[in-house]
Image (cartoon, rainbow, N blue to C red):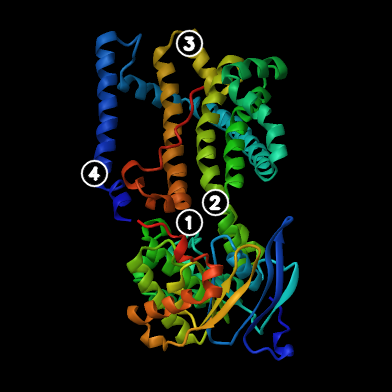
Amino acid sequence: MQESGAADGVHGLVVDGLVHAYAAEPVLADVSFALPAGRVGAIVGPSGCGKSTLLALVGGLLTPARGRVAGAFRRPAFVFQDPCLLPWRTARDNIAFGLKALPLGRAERQRRADALREAVGLTAADGDKHPQALSGGMRQRVALARALAIEPDLLLLDEPFAALDVGLRRQMQTLVRRLIDARGLTTLLVTHDPAEAVRMADRIVVLSARPATVAAVREVTLPTAGRHDGAVHAEVSRLVADPAVARALAIDDTAVEPV
Amino acid sequence: MTAPRSRTGLGAIAASTAGVLLLLGLWEAGHAAWGSLVLPSPRETALALWRMTVDGSLWPAVAGTGRRALAGFSAGVLLGTGLGAVAGLSDTTGRLLQPFATLALGVPAIAWVVLALLWFGGGGGAVVFTVLITVAPIVYAGAAEGVRSLDGDLRRMARAFRVPRRVLVWDVYLPHMLSHLFPAVATALALSWKVAVMTELLGGVGGIGDRLAAARAQVDTVAAMAWIATVVALLLALEMLLLDPLRRRLLGWRQALPGAARHGTARRDAAPDL
């Protein structure tokens, strides 16, 4: 993560001409987009198009071959599809894990962990359990609390709800959006599900198939509070009817065989 | 975690006590059937044990065996952990070392005893070597697997949170490594004790093994039983006073694994046969 953002006068996240390859295989051909501070962006694209790579580049886990990520972000936090919890630590200690990178005493770490545990809707008894004793949804809540505990200025969500069933996913989407809004947190979400993007994001960046370029950038104009199913479905229909989006996501009605 | 707790509750204690009583009952019955020369009674054995304690022959033998077993065990654990960690980190080294591990594991302990006695003569060195060579490959396998199987996702997560190296080692690497290493080390500890006694017996090195050999020469079944009881008691004490508490402390988190409540994980690491 470059810390030159403030000097650049960049307000928010700017991804500028990112190019990346694994060995000789190009993954990102040329990806540029911007996201205003405090907004939620969604990266949508066909599977294997390099969405996760893009997120890792933005979060500083990878160094781009070319291009740059700008923004005055010092502390990004990740939530992955797999919760990636330490099985030998309790939920509470897992939430406090990221805090060990900060100059905080043990008592303060535990206090913050407890506050976040409550914020994501876990009881004190859940906090004392090890991850194996928690359900999939609860584990993902722990992972979310762990990310928010470090008080990040950039939240990076990599398909965080893909492994959850539909009802749980809906719950988590609402919870996450509420927590993000309460903190005014700039957030980048990777998802393969256009409905999830519409439900959660303010701006949708559609990537093409690998090697990825930006196929389309669309704003979601629905008010955050008014994103119930009907409105979301209508918006998704509008989105995928867009030729640029449909081409990138390989949504082609004529190619679908009759059932 | 309420299910695992019940295994250490009153019901569990009652079951364990019943098991010990059953064992003593069968022992007594065997004694009644075959007589003292074949199977001395528990009472005779306890009396012999008491005499050994009073006349001062028990403690030096136990200390001697313990010292040699512990020396070989420590050396074996150090060697096995070091080489195992290297093998886990580097595939090439792992392949290079595998034949040695297989050889050390495949040769029966009794054959190592013979070789050790030929190489080192009848001194304590033979015992230490035999224990080392039987312990090291077991620990080696555990350590290699521990390092090799560390979840790449967890490493990536730790990197994403930019935790310092100390936290990475202490919170991620070590607990994972221990979960593989501890069962191997626990097995090795019990094994080292048995192998030490065996080598002493065949080599006349001193210690409990030597006393067993003497009892055999004098056809003193009572003394033999008393020494055997000593070995078993020491193994049990090691298990209950050292290994079980350590296991609960270090691997307690595993109890929450699905199925663990029913089957438990504590006894999975039964010692292999010699």
Name the kind of residue labelled 1 in the image. Answer: Trp
Q: Which residue is drawn at 43% across and 76% down?
A: A236
Q: Point out which mark residue B216 bears.
A: 3
Find the residue positioned furthest to the right: A66
- In the rendered view, tell whether residue B73 sits above or below residue B39: below
Q: Residues within 10 Å of mark 3 (few under 14, many from 20)?
A: few
Q: Which chain carries label 4?
A: B
Helix, strand or loop at label 2? It is helix
Query: Quick one: label 3 or label 2, which is nearer the N terminus?
Result: 2
Callout 1 secondary element: loop
Q: How far apart in space, not on screen, are marks 2 and 4 (Cα)?
A: 32 Å
Q: Name the residue under label 1.
A: A88
The count of marks equals 4
Q: Where is residue A211 in the image (x, y as percent from the top left)?
A: 66, 63
Q: Position of residue A29 (x, y in %)?
A: 69, 67
Query: Mark 2 — on which chain does it sit?
Result: B
Chain at tag 3: B
Q: Is residue B203 left or right of residue A18?
A: left
